[in-house]
Amino acid sequence: MQPLSLLPIMSGYCVGILARCFNIWSHYLISLVVGMIVAQLESLGNCFVRKHQTIAKITRKHVIPKSINDGVTMLLPFFPIFGYLAFCNAGMKREDQMGYVRQHHSEYLSQYSNLSNFVIYEPNFWLYFVIWFGFFGGIFTGFVFTFTTVDMFKMLGKSRRKISVTNFKRHRSTVKSLLAQFAASSLLLVPLFCFTLVVMGEFEHSQMMINIILAVFSLRSSVNALVLIVTTPSFRKFILRKASSNNFVIATVAISMSRNSFQ
């Protein structure tokens, strides 16, 4: 359900099985993508907070009361759902789309007539609400990342004598891995910010700019996976062990085949 834009009209469509084979309206799929982005960011933020609290319990500083922690954790699933439902209200009704094109952009009528599954957006309360919701949500998430990271390194420095060397290295490795994941998440946040600017700003050659932004945006999963493997020793050892075992199997089969050929 990869969304693609159709500028200069604020519109788009989705490619993939759900849109083309099951004819699920692209607006619902794009709304689902928005909800998944919210879920990914808050999950990463929750990882930072959980690790921060693990270290805080060792130093007995900045420990969040269990009731508050449990209450916030229970609220987390509602934010992606809220993002999905809010964006669902931001789109134009499906039956009104062709009339809108005919009235306001008649020069593109033939092109849109060939599309069976697309969505058009026009500035309204819900669209602006989702934009501001994402903007302030991104700022708040960035604040959580920054505060917890700085505080974790401070607490690790103070607790170095209270925990074993192995535990200290493990905690520090986890914090560095989280930082790397946060840096990789810039492929999620920066393209979205640029996408909003281009769509709302109506720049020249905006369609080409959007295509580049979406290409960068699609790299996020691969980059996140590579960062996780590189920065997390347990994952890295697992991958290297699998790779070495596969190479051993391939080499064994090759030797067996060569012996059989000589026989």
Image (spheres, rainbow, N blue to C red):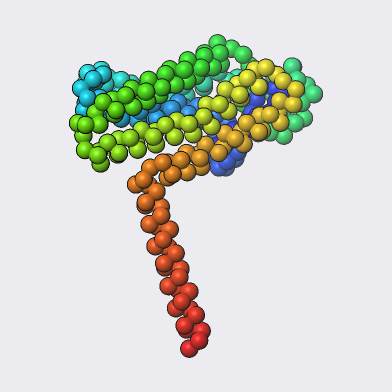
In this rendering, is residue 46 above or below 231?
A: above
Q: Residue furthest top?
A: 125
User: What percent of the width, then of the height, locates residue 192?
Assistant: 56, 26
In this rendering, is residue 223 above or below 36?
A: below
Instruction: Tell me which corner region of the image, top left, top right, bottom left or bottom right, holds residue 67.
Output: top left
Quadrant holding the N terminus: top right
Q: Residue furthest right?
A: 107
Which of these two is toward me, 206 or 155? 155
Q: Is any part of residue 40 visible from this angle? A: no
Which of these two is toward me, 216 or 94? 216
147 sits to left or right of 18: left
User: What percent of the width, then of the height, locates residue 52?
Assistant: 30, 26
Instruction: Tell me which corner region of the image, top left, top right, bottom left or bottom right, holds residue 108.
Output: top right
Q: Residue at x 57, y 41 (%)?
A: 16
Q: Residue furthest front?
A: 161
Q: Residue at x 29, y 29 (%)?
A: 156
Q: Residue at x 65, y 17 (%)?
A: 200
User: What percent of the width, then of the height, locates residue 122?
Assistant: 63, 16
Q: Is any part of residue 139 visible from this angle? A: yes
Instruction: Give the total of numbered labels.
Output: 0
Q: Residue at x 39, y 34 (%)?
A: 176
